[in-house]
Image (cartoon, helix red, strand yellow):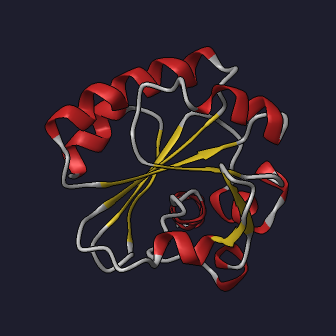
Amino acid sequence: MKKLILLSLIFISCGIFQPSKFDKSSLEENILSVERDSLKFSEIINSKNQNKTLIHIYASYCPFSQKSLEEIGEFQKENKNIKYVFLSVDHSYFDWKRGVEDLPVKGEHYYLPRKGKGFLGRFLKLKEIPRFLVLNKEGEIKVFKSSKVSKIKESL
């Protein structure tokens, strides 16, 4: 009986963190636009959007991120009715800005200056890139953590 209880506790404690909405602190995180305007994350995701939103977190220097950007570029050709938000965690704003025009994707591009150490990064438990999130039309998180475009296709 004790073993059964112990096993149950282990399985329950290992549950996957899958929030349905962003917490207040993460929504207040300041993010930079290409023009270096400071915006709150809430302004980006709460814009009057009638479509689902795909958020892609990447770094332009990362080979895995570069491949995922190419895959998203192909994905965009077939899925134009989605809002695309790209959040970079490059080493610096200038490194990111230098390459943002050459990216094979279209959408809203922003730089996350505090990376995984800010409120948004901690909420996302941001340790790996690339990373994808999917929000529904109401702004609820439908896919919290995915590293593959193929898994995103299933949820859209």
Q: Residue at x 75, y 55 (%)?
A: 36
Please, which residue is most extreme toward the bottom here?
24
- Indicate left or right for 40 with 78 as reference: right
Above or below — where is 24 with respect to 89? below
Residue at horizontal 78 percent and vertical 51 percent from the top: 116
Residue 152 pos. (x, y %):
30, 43
Q: Position of residue 110 (x, y in %)?
A: 62, 51
Residue at 28% over, 31% down: 150
Q: Residue at 56%, 77% (x, y): give it.
A: 43
Viewed as shown, does residue 116 lie left or right of 130?
right
Q: Residue furthest front?
A: 35
Q: Position of residue 50 (x, y in %)?
A: 23, 74
Numbered-mark total: 0
Which residue extends farthest left? 78
> Residue 145: x and y, percent?
48, 49
Q: Is residue 89 above or below residue 102?
A: below
Left/right placement of residue 24 relative to residue 151 reads right
Name the foreground residue: 25 vs 87.
87
Above or below — where is 123 with respect to 133?
below
Place residue 114 in its image quadrant: bottom right
| Residue 135 found in image quarter | bottom left
